Image (tube, grey):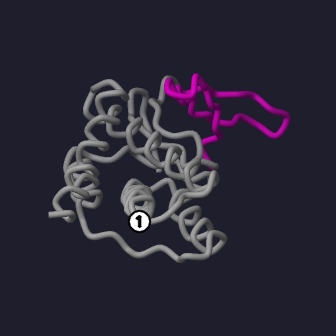
Amino acid sequence: MEFAVGDKVVHPYHGPGTIARVEQKEFMEGQERYYVIEIPDQGLTLHIPQHRMGITGVRRAMSEKQRHQVLDTLRSKPQELPGDHKERQEQVWEKLKTGHPFQIAEAVRDLTWHQKDSHLTKKDTDYLDRGRKLLAAEMALVSDTEVDDASKQIEATLNAALDTAAN
């Protein structure tokens, strides 16, 4: 997949950023093209070889339409998570590590609902926080807003879904 300077992208582990520049590096085997990705939320600059972008899982950031679909996912009926904490954490981690916004939104939604009815372990809480931060950072990037504003929108959406279910 080809990217250009200014493209908004998401690294599955580090989160959303922007292609800041493309560099050519000289090695004994020849030249290698690198994408330089600035990830402001993490304070990181990544240098990823062009041929490794797909292998690494770097993808284009969600579209505005997908942002609305993520909010719809947060509003939708949750999947019940396993009662066994190890099974639950494995299931949630599988979704989070994909780096895909719909999978992350499902994990956030399901953990939020699980928290309403049951105790979350420290690891569950860490996963929930991680998912919320990843979603908020990507939503802020694509809507040109602050991460804090995107976090508030996520919280408001989840709270409205919980309130609707309670009535």
Q: Residue at x 57, y 56 (%)?
A: 124
Which image quadrant for residue 4? top left
Left or right relative to 70: residue 23: right
Which image quadrant for residue 69? bottom left
Query: Along the line of sight, which residue is nearer the eye, 31 or 36?
Result: 36
Query: Along the line of sight, which residue is nearer the eye, 105 or 81?
Result: 81
* Residue 135 in the image, given as x and y percentages of width and height: 40, 44
What SS does tag 1 mark? helix
Q: Amino acid at mark 1?
A: Asp
- Residue 124 sits above or below residue 58 on the image: below
Give, as a single range, the part of the protein colored magenta.
22-51
- Residue 115 sits above or below residue 22 on the image: below
> Would residue 34 be counted in the magenta stretch?
yes
Q: Which residue is mark 1?
A: 117
Q: Residue at x 75, y 28 (%)?
A: 26
* Residue 151 in the image, given as x and y percentages of width and height: 34, 36
The 10 Å Cα crowd at callout 1, few under 14, some 14 to 19, many 20 or more, is few
Please tell me whether the stretch drawn in magenta is mainly helix, strand or loop: strand
Most distant residue in the right direction = 28
Left or right relative to 116: residue 87: right
Left or right relative to 11: residue 46: right
Which image quadrant for residue 30? top right
Q: How many numbered marks, from 0 up?
A: 1
Q: Residue at x 59, y 46 (%)?
A: 13
Q: Quadrant of the C terminus?
A: bottom left
- Residue 123 sits above or below residue 146 on the image: below
Q: Residue at x 50, y 51 (%)?
A: 128
Query: Along the line of sight, which residue is nearer the eye, 129 or 159?
Result: 159
